[in-house]
Amino acid sequence: SKALAINDLADMKQRGEKITCLTAYDASFSSLLDKVGIDVILVGDSLGMVIQGQRTTVPVSIADMVYHTRCVSHARQRAFVMADLPFMSYATPKAAAKNAAKLMQQGGAHMVKLEGAKYDCVSFLVDQGIPVCGHLGLLPQSINQLGRYAVQGKTQIDADKIVTDALALQHAGATLLVLECVPAVLAKQISTQLNIPVIGIGAGLDCDGQVLVLYDMLNIGIAKRPRFSKNFMNNVTSIEAAIAAYQQAVKCGHFPTPEHSF
Ligand code: KIV
Ligand code: NA
């Protein structure tokens, strides 16, 4: 079937069809996700943890991201490919543009994702014709500031800040938003308030789509699986069936359940 573009994701939000997203870092998994019908493949900087065995995503370089993005892009036909700008690769709008260009020209990404309320970077990239996905809530690249991976936006002040940032990112031209580890009620409010699709991870059922780290949902990660993830290998006998079960569960609104939400 026809390759998905960013406007197809916007249309899915409009008609209430859930967007499915999983991470992949190589051609074999990229091809499998594509075959099963996963809408968006995220080449996440989570590769620092699940591929490289680092404790955080902080050590991941733009060269690492370009390499894995290229591996993924080559193998996909239909899925929309999004790649993370890694830590410190978007400290200025100019740096962001230079590094986003590498992900797109050398890696073949269709969109780049960056963490936090970086309006200047977002609008500069969008001005250059680069589609941008924002990422709010838990920001793993800021782990050394946060101290630990925890639910964000629990107080009214913190929740209001995330809403304000989400609206500002949309205003700056972001055309997708990932919300990580926030209360389900907050994610629902933001998904309703924004025109752009909101993809949740640990953000409840009422987002416009869902994303998980592939190795977590296949239960082959090094670290303990986060509470919001789920072992989709549980009732199946193949990796393909596990990915298909996730695809089905997200499309039908059966994942995440309250046990996988905050
Ligand atoms: O790097 C990653 O896998 C991500 C997802 C957790 C959203 O950014
Ligand atoms: Na990431």
Image (cartoon, helix red, strand yellow):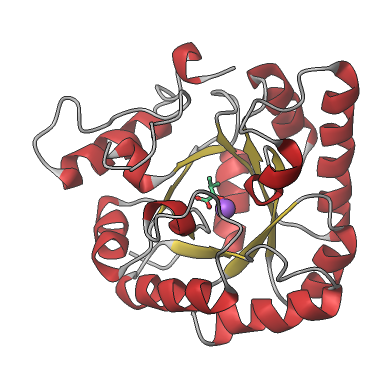
Residue in the image at 76% along x and 57% along y = 174
Is 233 left, or right, of 116 in this rendering? left
Residue at the far top in the pictured view: 258
State the quadrant of the N terminus.
bottom left
Residue in the image at 58% along x and 75% along y = 62
Between 194 and 47, the residue placed more toward the observer is: 47
Q: Position of residue 40 (x, y in %)?
A: 46, 55
Residue at the far bottom in the pictured view: 105
Is 105 left, or right, of 193 in this rendering? left
Residue in the image at 53% along x and 59% along y = 45
When asked about the image quadrant of residue 15, the answer is: top right
State the quadrant of the C terminus.
top right
Q: Where is residue 106 in the image (x, y as percent from the top left)?
A: 51, 86
Q: Where is residue 230 in the image (x, y as percent from the top left)?
A: 36, 27
Is 27 left, or right, of 188 in this rendering? left
Residue in the image at 69% along x and 17% along y = 185
Task: Answer yes or no: is residue 196 visible.
Answer: no
Total tally of numbered discs in the picture: 0
Task: Answer yes or no: is residue 18 visible.
Answer: yes
Q: Where is residue 108 in the image (x, y as percent from the top left)?
A: 49, 79
**In the image, is residue 159 above or below residue 100?**
above
Between 140 and 187, the residue placed more toward the observer is: 140
When asked about the image quadrant of residue 231, the answer is: top left
Between 90 and 38, the residue placed more toward the observer is: 90
**In the image, is residue 186 above or below residue 58?**
above
When asked about the image quadrant of residue 104, the answer is: bottom right
